[in-house]
Image (cartoon, grey):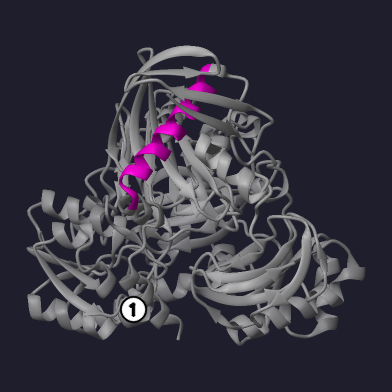
Amino acid sequence: MKNFQLSFPDSEKKSEVSISSDSKAVINGKEVEFNYKWLSPNVMILRIDNRNYYFSVAENTDDNYTEINLDSILYKVICKSELDLLKEKLSGNKSGDSVKNEVVSPMPGIIKKLNVHEGQQIKKGDVLLVLEAMKMENEIKSKKDSVIKKICVEEMNSVEKNELLILLG
Amino acid sequence: MFKKILIANRGEIAVRILSTAKEMGIKTVAVYSDFDRYSLFTKLADETYRLGESPSSKSYLLADKIIEIAKKTGAEAIHPGYGFLSERGFFAKMCEDNGIKFIGPGYKSIELLGSKTEAKALALKNDVPVVPGTDKPLQDMSKIKTIASEIGYPVLIKASAGGGGKGMRVVNDESEIESSLRMAQSEAKSSFGDDSVFIEKYIVNPRHIEFQILADEHGNVIHLGERECSMQRRHQKIIEETPSVIMDENLRKEMGECAKRIVKAAGYTNAGTVEFIVDENKKFYFLEVNTRLQVEHPITEIRTGLDLVREQLKVAFGEKLAFTQEDISFKGHTIECRICAEDSYDNFMPSSGKITYMKRFLGSGMREDTGIEQDDEISVYYDPMISKLISYGADRTIAIEKMKRALKDYVIVGIKTNINFLLSLLECKEFIDGNYHTQFIEKEFKSRIISPDFSNEELDAAVSLAAVLFKENKNSVNGKIKMSSNGISGNWIKKRQDTYR
C-alpha cells in the first residue's frame, strides 16, 4: 500500500490516493479499479472503473507541480508521497509556499524594458520587465509578493534561456 | 501546365502548395534553411536545395539565391507563399527578368497596391469608400490639427511606413493630439526611420472583413466571398470564419463589386485579398490589398469547393478562369483556428522547443494544414504557428461544435499552445452571438482561459490518480522523463544563442 496526498494550487481541494495493487486504488475513500498505458513518457490512457481519460502530463519544475492536461484543460497538481511528507517534516520546510526567488529568462531574447528598481516592493502579477523574443514583446511578471533584491541585467541586454534576470528577496 | 515549380517558402504553406502541385503532376523544388533541413515540406518535394543559415535574412529572403536555384533546376515558376518575398515587387520583377513565372500578380500591381497612399488613391478614383483621412504623409503639427478637426474626433495617427500597431495612436479630442503625435512620431522614427504619419477617422469597434479575389490574365475577375477576420490579438488574426454573421446578399454583392473594381484598376492578376473594415452600422471602408495567398485561404476553399493553389497555378500558366461570378456558390459554414506555440496560461509567452508527442483526431468535417510533425522543434526564427484547424458544418453552430471537439482532442506535448485560449473564445457569448470586433480580445474579453471544474469529483479522482502514476513512473525511469519535460537539446540551445550574439 502506497499513500499519497495531493493538493490543487488553483483550488482549496485536497485529495488522497492509496495504491493497493497494480489495478486497485482507494481515492478519497472510494475503492476503484484501474488500468493504464503510457503512450509516450508523458501521455497516458487511464481507465478508472471502465471510464476513459486521455491525459498528457508534464512537470513544472519552476513551481514544483505537475501539469495534467485533459481535453486541453490544464490541472495543476502537487503530489506528495508519505516519504516526501516525512522529509519535509524533518527539514522543517513547509509545503506550498516555495516559489523561487530567482526570476530567470524563459527563452532567449532581448531585455526591452525594465519596469522595476532594486529595493522596490512588488506584488504578484506585477510586470517586472519586457523581454523581446520570437518577434514579440513578452511581459515577465512576478509570481509572488516580494522585494527586488538585485537586478542582474540591463535594458537591451541579450539573455539566454534560464539566465538569471532578477533576484527577489 | 508547368512541368516544375519552385516553392520559396517553408512550413505549412509550403506543404499546402506542394500537395496541389503534386496532384497536378508538377515536379517540385523546395528550398530550406539549416533549421528546416528535414522539415516536412522538404520531405514531400522532389528536389531540395539549401539556402543558408536559419535566420530568414540568411535563407528565405535571399532572392538571388532562390532565382539561381530555380534556373539551375529548370523550375519554370516560383510560388512565394505568404510572408518572406511574397509581397516584394522587386522579387516578382527579378523572376520576370530571368524568364521565370512569378505565381502571383505582376510586380507593378504589387508595388502599386503595396503603397498605402497609392492604393487609397486608386480606391477613391474607383468609387470604393475609404476611411476619411489624409492621403499624403504629414509631419507638420498645425496642418495635422486642422485636418483632425475637419475629419472629426476620434482620429487615428499612424506611421506611414508602419505596420503591426507600431507608431499608432488613437486621439479622442484636440487636447491629446500634440502629445500623441509626438509619441507616434518617435515610435515611427525608431522603428522605421521615417517619422511621417497619416491621420484618419478612428472607427470604433470595427470588423475586419476581407474578400478573396481571383483574376486571370484575360481580364476576368471574380470574388469568392468574404472572410470574417475580426478575432485578433495584437493585430494577429487567430480565428477566421465565413460567412460573416453580419453579411447579407446585398452587402456581399456591394463589397464584392468594390473589391473587383479595385483589383481590376490595378491590373491585378492571380489570387489576392481585398481587406475592408466595417463599422457598427455596416458601413465599409477599403483597407488594403494583400497581393498573395492568405493564411486563412482554406475557409474559402471549403465553402466554395475550389482549390485556390490550383487556380493560382492555372492562372499563372495563362489559362482563363473556368467559371464566372454566377457559377460560384457558397455552402455551409467554415471556421479556422490558428494553433500557435504560445502559453495560454502565461500571457501568451511564445513557447519554443521540441514536440515530443502529437496526436489529433480530426474526424468528419475537419481539415488540418500543418508543416509540423511529432519530434519537430518549434524555433525562435519563424512565426509560432503550429497548425491551422479548419472545421466545416452545414451551419455555424455545427462548425463551432466540430471545432471545439477537435481542439479538445488535439494532444501536443513538449511546448505550450493557445488551444485552451481558442476554446475559451469559441465558448464565449460574444463569439457565439457573432458579436465581436477587432479590439474585442484586448478590450472586452476577460475570461481567457477555461479553468478546471473542481466540483466534479470523478474528474478530481482521475486527475489525482494520473498525478500519482506519473510520479511513480518518473521515479522508475528518471532520466528519460527529465529530458522530455524540458524537451530542448543542448545543441539547439547553442545554435539559438548564436543568432543573438
Q: Position of residue B391 (x, y in %)?
A: 38, 34
Q: Nearer the viewer, residue A5 or A92?
A: A92
Q: Is residue B471 magenta?
A: yes
Q: Residue at x 47, y 60 (%)?
A: B262
Give neighbour class at mark 1: few <14, some 14-19, many 20+ (Cα, 10 Å).
some
Q: Which quadrant: the N terminus of chain B?
A: bottom left
Q: Residue at x 60, y 58 (%)?
A: B234
Q: Nearer the viewer, residue B287 or B500?
A: B500
Q: Residue furthest right?
A: B175
Left or right placement of residue B73 versus residue A17 in this view: left
Camera sees residue A112: yes
Q: Nearer the viewer, residue B67 or B318?
A: B67
Camera sees residue B247: no
Q: Which quadrant: the C terminus of chain B?
A: bottom left
**Three-letter code, disc 1:** Leu
Q: Residue furthest front?
A: A90
* Quadrant of residue B293 within the rendered picture: bottom left
Provide the secondary structure element on which disc 1 rests. Answer: loop
Q: Position of residue B347 (x, y in %)?
A: 61, 54
Q: Residue at x 23, y 71 (%)?
A: B32
Q: Is residue A114 above or below residue B247?
A: below
Q: Nearer the viewer, residue A76 or B323?
A: A76
Q: Is residue A151 above or below residue B271?
A: below
In magenta, the rendered stretch is B458-478
Q: Which residue is mark 1?
A: B61
Q: Is residue B87 magenta?
A: no
Q: Position of residue B156 (x, y in %)?
A: 74, 65
